[in-house]
Image: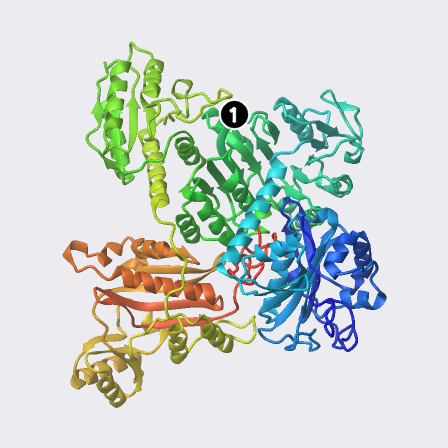
């Protein structure tokens, strides 16, 4: 139960009860009405999976606030106000509802039009009383308090309000919160203690004084993420585990989708009651029908909506009145139909959220849960696969029926299935949160067309893939998303998708066929714990084809394929397989089989299944013409569907080898250390932010500003990145003097971006070791460039020339890019990318990812470079990208890497408007007011959106 905390100092002499006017403290700020901070509005998932709408208070909320106060129990009011406070006097009411959104901030949690919780902070003066100034003291303190209606306590509303109040306070320049809590108010003390902040406590006269800094800590961010996961998982659980289902638009016409949806629910033997809603029929398929969902006598957890888009408003009104918890909208005609449909779709979701409901769709195929205790088939597919341990999320409704049919035909059992259609509310990120802790799901499959919030996807997928493999198809690599999804997503190029998946451990496949090939192996076989693969079969030709395919995929053969001969008996094949699996150098096995003329293939299949039973090594079969999990290779589960230990069969050697290679690469990724996200030594983030604030373009619409050389040096110095010492010289005499100061040998470089980016080094003269050589080199550059101004730079140790960049990305905001310098590298696009933030493991992987990376490790006898120094440089640049979203581009070129270290000899930085923030700060769902552009947030103060 969540009990409110009283405002600070409620009974202390000279200190204003928070929000209650006293002598010497103005009831309303005399300043002009402040701008309403609309960006603070948010839809948030409560701990029970329901939605609440959070927004700043307005003067027009006075009547609703009075009703809210009257609804509180005496005990709740006592804990909140430290004494009886049965009614709010008019003067206090005005002060409660009229705030400046700076020194005084208040948030409401709403369900429909009713207030269910209130949180507020009041800035404190240096002496500890209520602040009277209109602007908060930078780094100052504020008193925080909140209260929830009795029937909504225990939903985590106090934690939600605390997160959003802290973010607003940080935005306004405040640094600390204080609160006074009655010692008996254990639940509220727990809210503060478990928020992840470092809370100091003092006790006097039965009151606890709590005080804490509100800057995010590693623990507070972890607490936020854990609460977000539990809440969003619960909201999906509510959708997939309904106790009752209403089908709105359940037609008596078998050709209508409403009829099909009802028929599939009944055919699937859903364990709860099903209510057809049809005003023109007494019954549908023998089940009593109701004219409206409000006429149903029982509660309705899930409503499946199959009425035309034009009738959705009436349906919404009845669902809201009934208190339906979730909607599955299979109807089309929303964002998929154009701009007018997009407006209707947003209105649908906004109304649903305002009343605590989640929406799947519109234009969705539906949802399914094969658990025996549920048996929910609320989809348009007449048959769903049997029970299994694979969760499937599809953005496409049209493909959904084909996906389910393909899974069923291949023997792939599912735990749950969700087709989100236009993905207006519930999304793939919500399903990742649910599957993270779902005990019925071991493997996750995704069909994706877009990412609403790719940074959040990366964070969730990286965490989930550590325990459960994720296999994903990302369509639209060349053509972009569908019209319905384009309204809520930004374009994301394939290099960014590849970087995201590689970092997060997601197994990427290009086709649905490859998706199922990989899923079968993951669902029924263990992960390999090494690279060695044995091939055993009764055909030398087929065995060689498998061996070639495995080698093409980068796998390691433990020996030549073992051929037992075409005339071998089933027992001989089983014996050879068992012997191969007993070899410690073998970590996986592919069994190949061509049916002999005399003996049925089923006998060999059963022999193979028995031979591999109980092994801890994955086994795949190439039984020509057999695809999926035939009955002879299946180990039946509780409901007769294939279970753990079943052997998947592939119709070609290439498909078997490719599936095994994908699984093996994933197993290697999962076996690596998780990686640490730390701050390198010598980083001065506060000084860097102050520099950026001073140097960035003053207007958001201005083009990015290229920093001068001294500005670049200052900013890089904040992150411990030195640039090899240089001078800028006007004329040859200044160049000679500069070289004398720096010490020979030096490098001469032409000034100007067009010379820096050329791969033929026409604007560079190396190894200038005397004044005479320098004069000749200077004359050469003047002939090429027409300018006598040059850079004179101390020669760095010779090494491999590399380029490290922060590049602007429309979906992530910033990516790190790394590659070796040179025309061939640029021509082939041999660059690797990583999403920010980067761990030490990400940095190590990035510098080894380009195809030319072996040149850094001592290729063909050359001296290996100091890769550790290069990795540290990557971490420092990654920290810049994470801390300073205003940096729209940064290029370190060239970086010379040798055995002596990594030396930056050139740098360019451009500042511009930071990207829209979508991930970090207080929890919130996707903002429906404007199209979601999928732009990233920096982990910090910004609102965190769902995707």
Looking at the image, residue 182 sits to the left or right of residue 507; the answer is right
Does residue 920 lie above or below 694 as drawn?
A: above
Residue 891 located left or right of residue 61: left
Query: Residue 379, can we see it?
Result: no
Residue 609 at what x, y percent from top left?
Answer: 35, 20
* Residue that appears at 68% across and 48% down: 353
**In the figure, residue 807 lies in which quadrant?**
bottom left
Name the residue rendered at 59%, 68% in the picture.
176
Given residues 662 and 306, the one toward you in this image is 662
- Please rate how many residues cluster around mark 1, counting C-alpha atoms within 10 Å: few if below 14, some from 14 to 19, many from 20: many
Q: Is residue 718 above or below residue 421?
A: below
Q: Residue, x 46% and y 75% (percent of image)?
A: 687
Q: Whole-percent x and y of residue 717?
A: 38, 74
Work out whether residue 809 can be spotted. Answer: yes
Q: How has the structure been colored for display?
A: rainbow
Q: Residue furthest bottom?
A: 733
**In the foreground, 364 or 679:** 679
Query: Percent x, y for residue 596?
Result: 28, 14
Residue 321 to residue 105: above or below: above
Q: For this view, does 495 lie left or right of residue 128?
A: left
Q: Quadrant of residue 892?
A: bottom left
Which residue extends farthest top? Answer: 598
Q: Which residue is mark 1?
A: 386
Looking at the image, residue 707 lies above or below residue 839: below
* Image spot of residue 797 (x, y percent): 21, 71
Toward the front, the furthest residue is 205
Give the total of numbered labels: 1
Callout 1: SS: loop
């Amino acid at each position: 139960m969540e009990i409110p905390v009283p405002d600070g100092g409620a009974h202390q002499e000279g200190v204003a009860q928070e929000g209650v006017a006293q002598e010497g403290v103005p009831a309303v700020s005399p300043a002009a009405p402040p701008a309403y901070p609309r960006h603070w509005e948010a839809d948030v998932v409560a701990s029970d999976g329901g939605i609440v709408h959070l927004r700043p208070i307005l003067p027009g909320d006075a009547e609703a606030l009075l009703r809210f106060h009257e609804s509180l129990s005496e005990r709740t009011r006592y804990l909140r106000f430290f004494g009886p406070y049965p009614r709010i006097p008019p003067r206090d009411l005005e002060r409660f509802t009229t705030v400046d959104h700076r020194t005084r901030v208040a948030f409401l949690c709403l369900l429909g039009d009713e207030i269910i919780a209130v949180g507020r902070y009041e800035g404190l003066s240096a002496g500890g009383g209520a602040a009277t100034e209109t602007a908060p003291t930078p780094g100052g303190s504020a008193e925080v308090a909140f209260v929830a209606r009795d029937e909504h306590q225990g939903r985590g509303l106090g934690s939600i309000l605390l997160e959003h109040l802290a973010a607003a306070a940080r935005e306004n320049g405040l640094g600390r919160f204080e609160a006074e809590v009655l010692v008996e108010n254990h639940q509220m003390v727990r809210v503060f203690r478990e928020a992840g902040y470092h809370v100091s406590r003092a006790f006097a006269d039965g009151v606890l004084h709590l005080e804490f800094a509100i800057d995010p800590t590693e623990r507070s961010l972890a607490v936020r993420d854990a609460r977000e996961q539990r809440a969003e998982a619960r909201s999906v659980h509510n959708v997939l585990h309904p106790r009752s289902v209403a089908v709105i638009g359940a037609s008596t016409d078998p050709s209508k989708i409403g009829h099909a949806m009802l028929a599939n629910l009944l055919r699937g033997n859903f364990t709860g009651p099903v209510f057809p809603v049809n005003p023109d029929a007494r019954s549908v398929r023998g089940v009593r029908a109701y004219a409206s969902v409000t006429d149903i006598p029982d509660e309705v957890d899930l409503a499946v909506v199959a009425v035309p888009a034009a009738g959705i408003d009436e349906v919404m009104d009845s669902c809201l009145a009934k208190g339906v918890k979730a909607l599955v909208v299979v109807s089309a005609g929303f964002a998929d139909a154009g701009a007018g449909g997009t407006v209707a779709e947003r209105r649908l979701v906004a109304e649903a959220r305002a009343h605590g409901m989640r929406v799947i769709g519109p234009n969705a195929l539906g949802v399914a849960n094969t658990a025996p205790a549920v048996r929910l088939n609320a989809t348009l597919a007449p048959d769903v696969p049997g029970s299994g341990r694979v969760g499937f999320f599809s953005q496409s409704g049209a493909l959904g029926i084909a996906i389910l049919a393909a899974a069923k035909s291949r023997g792939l059992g599912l735990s749950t299935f969700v087709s989100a259609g236009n993905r207006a509310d519930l999304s793939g990120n919500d399903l990742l949160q649910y599957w993270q802790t779902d005990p019925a799901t071991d493997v996750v499959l995704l069909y994706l067309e877009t990412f609403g919030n790719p940074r959040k996807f990366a964070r969730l997928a990286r965490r989930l893939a550590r325990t459960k493999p994720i296999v994903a198809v990302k369509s639209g690599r060349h053509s972009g998303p569908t019209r319905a999804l384009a309204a809520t997503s930004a374009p994301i190029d394939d290099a960014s998708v590849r970087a995201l998946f590689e970092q997060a451990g997601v197994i990427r496949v290009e086709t649905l066929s490859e998706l199922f090939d990989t899923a079968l192996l993951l669902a029924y076989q263990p992960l390999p714990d090494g690279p060695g693969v044995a091939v055993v079969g009764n055909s030398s030709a087929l065995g060689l084809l498998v061996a070639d395919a495995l080698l093409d995929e980068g796998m390691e053969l433990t020996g030549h394929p073992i051929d037992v001969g075409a005339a071998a008996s089933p027992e001989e094949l089983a014996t050879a397989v068992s012997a191969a699996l007993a070899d410690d150098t073998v970590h996986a096995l592919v069994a190949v089989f061509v049916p002999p003329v005399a003996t049925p293939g089923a006998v060999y299949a059963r022999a193979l299944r028995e031979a591999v039973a109980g092994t801890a090594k994955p086994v795949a079969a190439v039984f020509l013409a057999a695809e999926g999990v035939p009955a002879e290779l299946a180990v039946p589960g509780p409901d007769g569907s294939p279970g753990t230990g079943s052997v998947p069969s592939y119709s070609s050697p290439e498909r078997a080898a490719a599936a095994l290679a994908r699984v093996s690469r994933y197993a290697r990724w999962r076996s690596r250390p998780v990686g640490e996200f730390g701050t390198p030594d010598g980083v001065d983030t506060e000084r860097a932010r102050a520099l950026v604030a001073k140097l960035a373009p003053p207007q958001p619409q201005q083009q990015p500003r290229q920093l001068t050389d001294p500005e670049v040096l200052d900013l890089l110095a904040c992150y411990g990145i030195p640039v090899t010492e240089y001078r800028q010289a006007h004329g040859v005499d200044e160049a000679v003097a500069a070289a004398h100061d720096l010490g020979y040998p030096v490098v001469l470089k032409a000034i100007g971006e067009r010379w820096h980016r050329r791969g033929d080094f026409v604007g560079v003269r190396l190894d200038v070791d005397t004044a005479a050589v320098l004069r000749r080199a200077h004359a050469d550059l003047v002939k090429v460039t027409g300018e006598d101004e040059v850079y004179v730079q101390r020669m760095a140790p010779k090494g491999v020339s590399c380029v490290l960049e922060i590049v602007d990305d429309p979906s992530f905001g910033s990516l790190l890019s790394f590659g070796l310098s040179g025309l061939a590298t640029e021509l082939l696009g041999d660059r690797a990318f990583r999403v920010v933030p980067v761990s030490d493991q990400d940095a190590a992987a990035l510098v080894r990812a380009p195809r030319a990376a072996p040149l850094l490790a001592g290729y063909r006898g050359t001296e290996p470079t100091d890769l550790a120094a290069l990795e540290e440089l990557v971490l420092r640049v990654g920290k810049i990208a994470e801390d300073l979203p205003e940096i729209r581009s940064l290029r370190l070129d060239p970086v010379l890497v040798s055995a002596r270290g990594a030396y930056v000899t050139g740098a360019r930085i451009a500042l511009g408007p930071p990207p829209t923030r979508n991930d970090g700060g207080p929890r919130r769902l996707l903002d429906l007011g404007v199209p979601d552009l999928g732009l990233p947030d920096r982990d910090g103060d910004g609102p965190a959106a769902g995707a």
